[in-house]
Image (tube, rainbow, N blue to C red):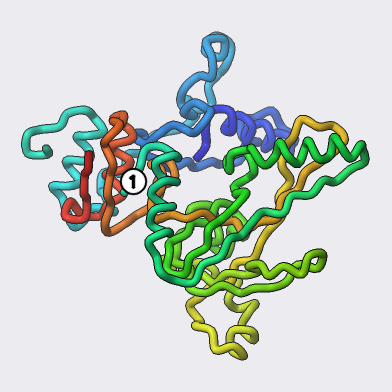
Amino acid sequence: MVGFTTFQHVDARLQQIMRTKKPFGRISVIVLGDFNQLRPVGDKYIFQFNNSYNALVDNPLWSLFELFELTEIMRQKDDKSFAIALSNIAKGTMTLEDINLLKSNAEVDAYNTKVLASLNTEGATANAYDFCVGDGLASIKEKVLSNVKNLKTTETYGLPLKIDLKVGAKYMMTVNSDTEDGLVNGACGKLVMIDYGKLQKTNETVPCRIWIKFNEEKTGRKARANFHNVMRNRNIDTSLTPIEPIIRQINTKSTNFKVERKQFPIVPCEAMTIYKSQGGTYEKVVVNLKKGTTRSELYVACSRSTKASGLYLIG
């Protein structure tokens, strides 16, 4: 999702690459999107000014584009009345005839924990391994590592401090580990198998690889090909994709140390926030309205479902 600031950065970078001051380096640009969806987190829509000063001095990039409106809805193409109702939600013109995505991360976490606890299947805990890179006092190093443990997953590049793994549960990728292979933030699937290994320092047995059956068959195709011999020798289902821990650098206030985290790039997704659902298509959707939603949130949540018969509202 591209906001005003990112849009400006794309323009500036293309000008640098193409060595010209012309917008977007004189490269043709096509942007696609839904005007009724939620704005980017921490930014404005690309067609809005970032502040009042921009409106006075800037020639807005958005004015360079010509709008072509697509009039055929594909996600709900088999349920026209539902498609019309969704359009009315977006415009705030619901008629009498028109009349489990969760709003907050806290609700999502609580629901996911509840579902995982109810599963009577093989389970394990994957703890993140944080380590410091750089020179400095040991006491400062310990403080930096301690502070990192209190960061939210959104502040650790999608790598959680702890992940409860349960065979049979649904999980979602939180990092773009291989864009070409479809292993991107938001890809969902079911955990089928857990591989274990031993830590060199402590000899502790920990999860070292997980096998996920993704909702989309094409997701992880290259990863499966790379593990073809392993899968054949162990008689592993060829539809399963191996996922291993990755390493990402975490921003800290320390100037002497850089912190890196090693963890599986996944989180449970028996439920997800409305923001996370954008771009997804599901046969069945439950929308939790207990704490209320904005019109844009309601539109995004409901429009994930392909048919009205697959949409359930609670609250």
**Residue type, label 1:** Leu
Against 161, is 119 above or below? below
Q: Is residue 97 above or below residue 237?
A: above
How dense is the environment of label 1, judged by Cα within 10 Å: few (below 14), some, or many (20 and up)? many
Q: Position of residue 165 (x, y in %)?
A: 52, 62
- Which secondary structure, mark 1? loop
User: Is residue 234 among the parts visible in the rendering?
Assistant: yes
Position in image of residue 59 (x %, y %): 55, 19
Compared to residue 229, the image places residue 21 above or below, namely above
Left/right placement of residue 257 relative to residue 276 reads right
Residue depicted at 71% across the width and 32% down the height: 20
* Residue under the image location 93 percent in, 41 percent down: 135
Query: In this view of the protein, which residue sits in the foreground, 173 or 269?
Result: 269
Q: Position of residue 18 (x, y in %)?
A: 72, 39
Count of numbered marks: 1
- In x, y percent, where is residue 74? 28, 53
Q: Is residue 242 left or right of residue 198?
A: left
Asked where in the image residue 79 lies, by quadrant, the reply is: bottom left
Report the residue marked by disc 1. 101
Quadrant position of the C terminus in the picture: top left
Which of these two is toward me, 309 or 86? 309
Left or right relative to 29: residue 272: left
Vertical relation: 237 (above or below) 186: below
Identify the residue shown where x is 53% and y is 84%: 236
Residue 222 is at least partly visible in this image: no
Q: Residue at x 15, y 50 (%)?
A: 80
Residue found at the far left of this picture: 96
